[in-house]
Image (cartoon, grey):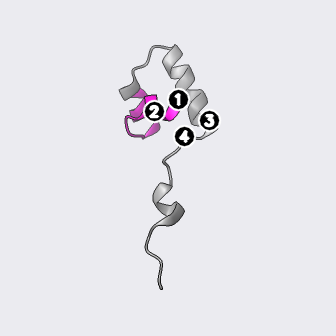
């Protein structure tokens, strides 16, 4: 039976890497809004869920 397009390919980019977490921390300390941080990183607005 042939596998679908599932697997790790569909999860690519879902999680923040360490460098992005460090950048987010700095942006938040600088008072940048979550929407602007998301735009800066090219991500969806899920920072509150992704950081926790």
Expressed as whole percent of the image width and height from the top left, the position of residue 12 reads 50, 55
- Label drawn at residue 16: 4
Q: Quadrant of residue 48?
A: top left
Q: Measure the C-alpha gap from mark 3 to mark 2.
A: 17 Å
Q: Secondary structure at mark 4?
A: loop
Mark 2–mark 1 CB contact (< 8 Å): yes
Name the residue that disc number 1 marks: 52
Work out whether 12 lies above or below 25. below
Mark 1–mark 4 CB contact (< 8 Å): no
The boundaries of the magenta stretch are 36-52
The residue at 58%/31% (across/down) is: 21
> Farthest residue in the front direction?
1
Badge 3 or badge 2: first in the primary sequence = 3
Q: Measure the C-alpha gap from mark 3 to mark 4.
A: 8 Å
Q: Secondary structure at mark 1?
A: loop
Q: Secondary structure at mark 2?
A: helix
Helix, strand or loop: magenta stretch = helix
The residue at 45%/33% (across/down) is: 49
Please tell me whether residue 41 belongs to the stretch shown in magenta: yes
Name the residue that disc number 2 marks: 49
Between 36 and 6, which is closer to the camera in this rendering?
Answer: 6
């Amino acid at each position: 039976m042939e596998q679908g397009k599932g697997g790790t390919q569909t999860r690519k980019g879902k999680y923040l890497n360490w460098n992005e977490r460090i950048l987010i921390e700095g942006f938040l300390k600088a008072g940048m809004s979550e929407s602007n941080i998301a735009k800066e990183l090219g991500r969806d607005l899920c920072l509150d869920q992704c950081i926790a």
